[in-house]
Amino acid sequence: MKKINLGVLVSGSGSNLQAIIDNIESGKLNAIIRVVISNIPDVRALERAKDHNIPAVVIDRENFSTREEFDREAVSVLKSHSVDLVIMAGFMKILTPVFLRAFSGKIMNIHPALLPSFQGLHVQQKAFDYGVKFSGCTVHFADEGVDTGPIIIQAVVPVHGGDTADILQQRILKEEHKIYSQAIQFYAEGRLEIDGRKVHIKDSSIAKTPCIHNPPLEKF
Ligand code: GRF
């Protein structure tokens, strides 16, 4: 099967990038990372790319007077690296229509909450403070909104007694690292079909996920 060419957009730690690299190198994920682009210089994600001999480019947002100019440069770099699928991984910028048009239906993002709940920033803390019994994470196609594109896969993450927001954030992050590679692999296998707001997984004998309860039911 042809490997899918990825361009990964980062802004910070790059733990999702690292998980994708690891899954590619272990042979689980049928992809090649052609380029990593950071909008911020000197972030850990750039070191991770360098450690794995992956071309890395800084497109410093400070050098561009408009978001559209930044996006035109990013699109140019991605196209010059023959990227098929753009992966936003801890990328902290909102894409303009310039970018979305250039890669329509070919941009994924990961959000550390169960969309559409808790859109925006610091969502692990917001969910924890709200007192949810489940939070989670979502991989979705990017659209012109913020965290609003068609959902591909979600992980449900329970909140346990004694948790802190940080403990919850780490539990969610572990699941992010799994579902992002799964979503990319579905795409690489040509099994994602966007139908309006819905994304269907083709040719899947996927088991039906059972309902889950937190706290666990005792007599019912
Ligand atoms: C992750 O929780 C991601 O969902 C959010 O930023 C956090 C750090 O991502 N967007 P990474 O470690 O830089 O991949």
Image (tube, rainbow, N blue to C red):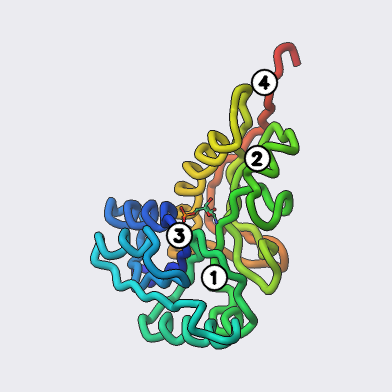
Q: Residues within 10 Å of mark 4 (few under 14, many from 20)?
A: few
Circles 4, 1 touching at the beta carbon (< 8 Å) = no
Instruction: Please tell me the numbered disc located at residue 161.
Output: none
In what element is the residue under mark 3? loop
- Residue 116 x/y as whole percent: 73, 53
Circles 3, 2 touching at the beta carbon (< 8 Å) = no
Mark earlier in primary sequence (3, 2): 3
Which residue is disc 3 drawn over?
A: 12
Q: Residues within 10 Å of mark 2 (few under 14, many from 20)?
A: many
Mark earlier in primary sequence (2, 1): 1
Residue 35 picture quarter: bottom left
In what element is the residue under mark 4? loop
Residue at 60% from the left image edge and 75% from the top image edge = 95
What amino acid type should be assigned to the residue bearing mark 3? Gly
- Ligand 1 lies under 8 Å from the Cβ of mark 2: no
Which residue is disc 4 drawn over?
A: 216
The residue mark sitting in front, 4 or 3, is 3
- Ligand 1 lies under 8 Å from the Cβ of mark 4: no
Cα gap from disc 2 to disc 1, whole angstroms: 24 Å
- Ligand 1 lies under 8 Å from the Cβ of mark 3: yes
Which residue is disc 1 drawn over?
A: 107
Circles 2, 4 touching at the beta carbon (< 8 Å) = no
Which residue is disc 2 drawn over?
A: 135
Q: Nearer the viewer, residue 7 or 104?
A: 7
Cα gap from disc 2 to disc 4, whole angstroms: 16 Å
Cα gap from disc 4 to disc 3, whole angstroms: 36 Å
